[in-house]
Amino acid sequence: MADPALPDLLFLKGKRALITGAASGIGRAIALRFAEAGANLELVDRDEEGLRRLRETLRESRVEVHIHRADLSRKEEIEALWARLKGRSVEILVNNAGVYTFRPFEEIDEAFYDGAMAVNLDAVFWMCQAFIRALPRGRGGAIVNISSVEAFLPFAEGLVHYDAAKLGVVALTRAIAREFGRRGIRANVLIPGGIRTEGVRRLQRETLRRLNIRRMILAFHFNARLPMGRFGDPDEVARAALFLASDLASYVNGAVLAVDGGFLSS
C-alpha cells in the first residue's frame, strides 16, 4: 500500500480540535491554521468578545466553530465545559491558555500562587484528564500542550511561579505520553520563546511608559540572545502545533519542541 500523500497527512478534516486561550495571540493563530486544515473547532477563553470576533473571521472557513466562555482556573467550569461537549467527539486538545503575571518571589502569597498554578498547570492537568476520559476506547487522539522557554532557562525576574508551572506542564505531558501511548494518544509539548504576541507588545509598551530600567536591560539581553535576530510570530508557533496535531507527527510522542528562534541553544 502506498504511503499517504503529504496533503492527506496534514489535513484535519473530520477531526474536532479544542483550543484554550483561543481569543488572541498563539491560541488564535492555532485556531486559524487548524481551520485552514479542515478541523472543526471548540474555542475556549475568558474573553467572549474575542471569541466572537474570531468566529466571525472563521465564517468563510466552512468548518464548525463553537465558542465557550470559561474560566479554566475553576475546575467546576472545566467540568461544565466537557459536559457541554458531550456527544461531540474531540480528537485534538491544545492547552494554550495561561497567565503571565510578574511578582517578586518574596512577595508571593498563597492566593497569588494558587491563582497562577490554577491556570498555568492545574487547568492543563484537568483538561488532559477530561480529554482522555472522553475519548472512546480504540480511538486515538493528540494533545499539544504549550509551555515556555522560561521552564528551561528562567530569564525574566518575578516569574518563579510561572517557571515552576510551565516545567510542570512538560513533566505532565511526557508522563501522559508514556502512560497512554498504547491507546493511540500522543502527547507533545511546544516551547515558545520570543513570540511577539499582543501580551508581549503590551508589556513592552508598559516597560517604556514606566521607564523600568531593570526590565529594559533584561529585554536588551533577551533580544541579544536570539540567534535569528528577531522575535517570532504567533503563526510560527501555530505551524508547529499543526504538525504535532496532524498525522505528519504520527510517531511523535512525548516530544519537547522548542519554537524559540534558537534562544535555548544560544
Image (spheres, grey):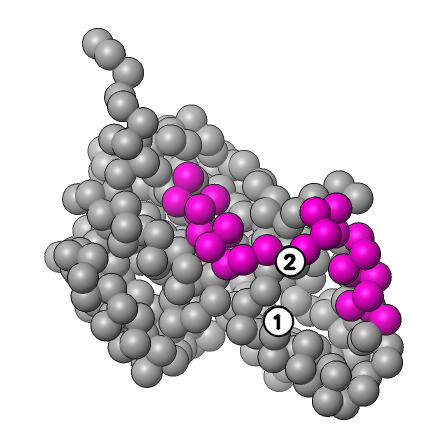
Check disc 1 and report the residue beneath it: 200
User: Closer to us: mark 2 or mark 1?
Assistant: 2
At 58% from the left edge and 41% from the top edge, which residue is drawn?
Answer: 256
Q: Residues within 10 Å of mark 1 (few under 14, many from 20)?
A: some
Q: Is residue 133 visible?
A: no
Q: Nearer the viewer, residue 240 or 172?
A: 240
Q: Is residue 58 visible?
A: yes
Q: Position of residue 63 (x, y in %)?
A: 17, 56
Q: Looking at the picture, which amino acid does disc 2 mark?
A: Phe
Q: Looking at the picture, which amino acid does disc 1 mark?
A: Val
Which SS class for mark 2?
A: loop
Q: Nearer the viewer, residue 199 or 151?
A: 199
Q: Residues within 10 Å of mark 2 (few under 14, many from 20)?
A: some
* Magenta-highlighted residues: 217-243
Q: Nearer the viewer, residue 251 or 222?
A: 222
**In the shown orientation, is residue 105 left or right of residue 163?**
right
Check disc 2 and report the residue beneath it: 231
Predominant SS along the magenta part: helix
CA distance separating discs 2 and 1: 10 Å
At 50% from the left edge and 59% from the top edge, which residue is drawn?
Answer: 234
- The numbered dot on residue 126 is none
Q: Are marks 2 and 1 in contact (CB under 8 Å)?
A: yes
Quadrant housing residue 148: bottom right
